[in-house]
Amino acid sequence: MSNIRCVLLLLSLLASSALSAQKEEKPEKAIKMVINNFFAGMEKGDTTLLRSACTADPVFQTFMANQEGKMQVYTEDFDEFVRFVGTPTKENFKEEIEFKAIHAEKSLASVWTPYKFYRNGKISHCGTNSFQLVKTDEGWKIQYIIDTRRRGCKD
């Protein structure tokens, strides 16, 4: 009889731990929302939405060819980028991304998103974004973005 009790106790513990694991929220949904908000802010010129997706001092970099064709890392000023996004213009910009990989643990996430960038409805360039996010008291925030940029992309 005691063996049956032990088995029942073990089964109830396993079931309980499985249920609590299911209740833990998977971070992928929240991470995607932050990145989508970043791009929605870019497209709408909404600097508040754009800033809300990032930490106070994010790092933005691009790895692309210079005028001589040599690959080089360029660091962009985040505040300058925000000013550009918030400046009214007749042009419209849209970046379409595809979530290829999301790796996350409790406080750090890495996201890989190939993209196509459109200017006034025509493809301007394409490449891949690599995001590093951190989980703050306010939730997931973008801390670092590096992307590649190339021309000659097909729609």
Image (spheres, rainbow, N blue to C red):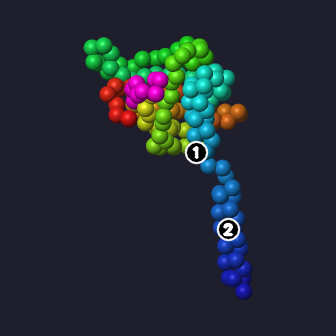
Q: From the viewer's side, name the closer residue of 26 and 7.
A: 26
Res. 112 mark:
none
**85 vs 99, nearest the viewer:** 85
Return the residue at label 1: 28
Quadrant in which the N terminus is drawn = bottom right
**Amino acid type of the residue tagged 2 in the rendering:** Ala
Q: What number of labels is visible?
A: 2
Task: Name the magenta segment's main secondary structure.
Answer: strand
Q: Residue at x 67, y 33 (%)?
A: 136
Number of residues whose C-alpha sits closer than 10 Å to that of mark 2, classed few (under 14), some (14–19) or many (20 or more): few
Residue 123 located within the stretch drawn in magenta: yes
From this viewpoint, is residue 108 visible?
Answer: no
Residue 28 visible here: yes
- The quadrant in which the C terminus is found is top left
Rendered image: mark on residue 15: 2
Instruction: Report the amino acid beneath label 1.
Output: Glu
Specify the quadrant of the image occupied by residue 63.
top left
Q: Which residue is located at x 51 percent, y 43 percent?
A: 103
N-terminal of the pair, mark 1 or mark 2, is 2
Magenta region, residue range: 118-126
Tell me whether circle 1 and circle 2 mark residues in contact (CB < 8 Å): no
Where 32 falls versus 143 (above or below)?
below
Examine the structure image and report whether residue 137 is included in the region drawn in magenta.
no
Q: Residue 140 placed where, x, y %?
A: 63, 35
Residue 10, x across and y down, in percent: 67, 72
